[in-house]
Image (tube, rainbow, N blue to C red):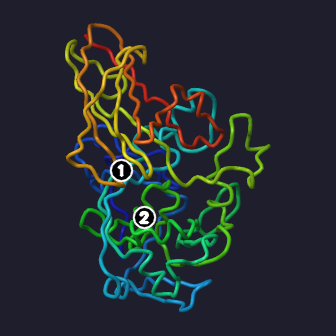
Amino acid sequence: MCSLRSQSSLTVHSTDPYNAEPAPERLVSSFLTPQKDLYVRSHGPVPMLDAGHHRLTVDGLVATPLDLSMVEIRRRFPVRSVTSVLQCAGNRRGDLRQVRPVSGDPWSAGAVGNAVWTGAALADVLHAAGVAADANPSMHIVFTACDTCETDHERYRYAASIPIGKALSPEVLLAYAINGEDLAAEHGFPLRVVVPGYAGVRSVKWVTGITVQLEPSDARPQARDYKLFPPHVTKETADWDAGMTINEMPVNAAICQPSAGARLQPGPTLLRGYATVSGRAVVRVDVSADGGRSWHQGMLKCDQAAPWGWTLWEATTDLPPGEHDLVVRAWDSAGQTQPSSPDDTWNFKGYLNNAWHRIRVTAG
């Protein structure tokens, strides 16, 4: 039986359900995020599960349904590891609240982390159930979890799905370990999905069922909660079928050090942070000390690069006495960069804010 670990180092946004994030400066202390510093996103109470009794079923459009114990998952399938970012679709939602109100927890820049995940490749498990590598590309893989959630007085089992093309990619895991240690309860013990490049909502925790079917999951997290709408749409006017399903995450970057509101010594100042992108590489990070009127290029710490991991960066800028608006933006290998203002990314759900990250500091 796994118990909930103390997360006293995290900033707690809500206790029921438990949602919390680390201080940004903790994220740049190492390339891999320690489990104790990884943000926690829960949609309901954290289930306390016993690995000895946990089962995973695989059914639906398969030739051979499976019913696997944790021991069978560990012994039957080759052990795979992937270094990958996990990021909430609501990361940096707090910046959107400065434009006008949005729903959801006011995440700062800490609803993200980078870790080595270890487990069985989802593709290996699906192949064992008879799903062919050239399976119907319109199929979806639905993950059902053990937690029970409640939103707007509606109770439901947590579930979400991904397209089969992504599911059969070698980087997608059924993970039972993070950075060489068992998952903590709040991070999905004893088994979770890890879908590199996709929003954290698809990396379902406490997974107990996998169903292969011809349509996406109709569970609330898939059908309603993680949809992107244009700025004129409200909760009351939203057509949920018309919203864009959030899968891949946009290019993003954040300043983690110094912290917002910091009082610094005038002179050369070290800035450090992270940059992320889905399916491509971060190729450049620009920083500004004057609100974005002038820029200089930061240094990417590419010695720790991983295809699905984040890129840490640092830059030194000279700060004369006074207040300064520090800004960062990243560029990916397709030449894509970030919009300048959260006004450009605002949506009533507060998702996918990748506007330039800005913090104000004082020198002197």
**Residue beneath the point at 25% across and 10% down:** 364
SS class, disc 2: strand
Farthest right residue? 237
Contact (CB < 8 A) between labels 2 and 1?
no
Residue 322 image point, x, y percent: 32, 8
Residue under the point 60% across and 63% down: 149
Residue that numbered label 2 is attached to? 194
- Residue sitting nearer the eye, 152 or 232: 232
Q: Residue 362 at x, y = what percent?
A: 32, 15
Vertical arrangement, residue 316 with respect to residue 183, above or below: above
Q: Residue 113 bears which disc, if any?
A: 1
Q: Which dot marks residue 352?
A: none
Task: Rate crowding at label 1 as few (under 14), some (14 to 19) or many (20 or more) other CA atoms within 10 Å.
Answer: many
Which image quarter: residue 314?
top left
Of 230 and 34, nearer the camera is: 230
Q: Is residue 220 left or right of residue 58?
A: right
Q: Is residue 335 above or below residue 309?
A: above
x, y (%) of residue 339?
Answer: 52, 30
Query: Which tag, 2 or 1, sits closer to the chain's start?
Result: 1
Instruction: Count neighbours of disc 2 (C-alpha within 10 A) and say few if under 14, some if 14 to 19, many if 20 or more.
Output: many
Q: Furthest-bottom residue in view?
A: 64
Q: Which quadrant holds the N terminus?
A: bottom left
The amino acid type, in three-letter code, at marker 1 is Gly
Q: Which residue is drawn at 61% across and 53% down?
A: 226
215 relative to 36, above or below: below
Instruction: Report, in whole angstroms, how far the alpha carbon at label 2 lies from the one at label 1.
Output: 13 Å
For image coordinates 53% across by 83% down, the residue present is: 131
Q: Which amino acid does label 2 sit on?
A: Val
Residue 72, image x, y percentages: 36, 88
Q: Quadrant of residue 4?
A: bottom left
Q: Is residue 237 left or right of residue 105?
A: right
| Label 1 element class | strand
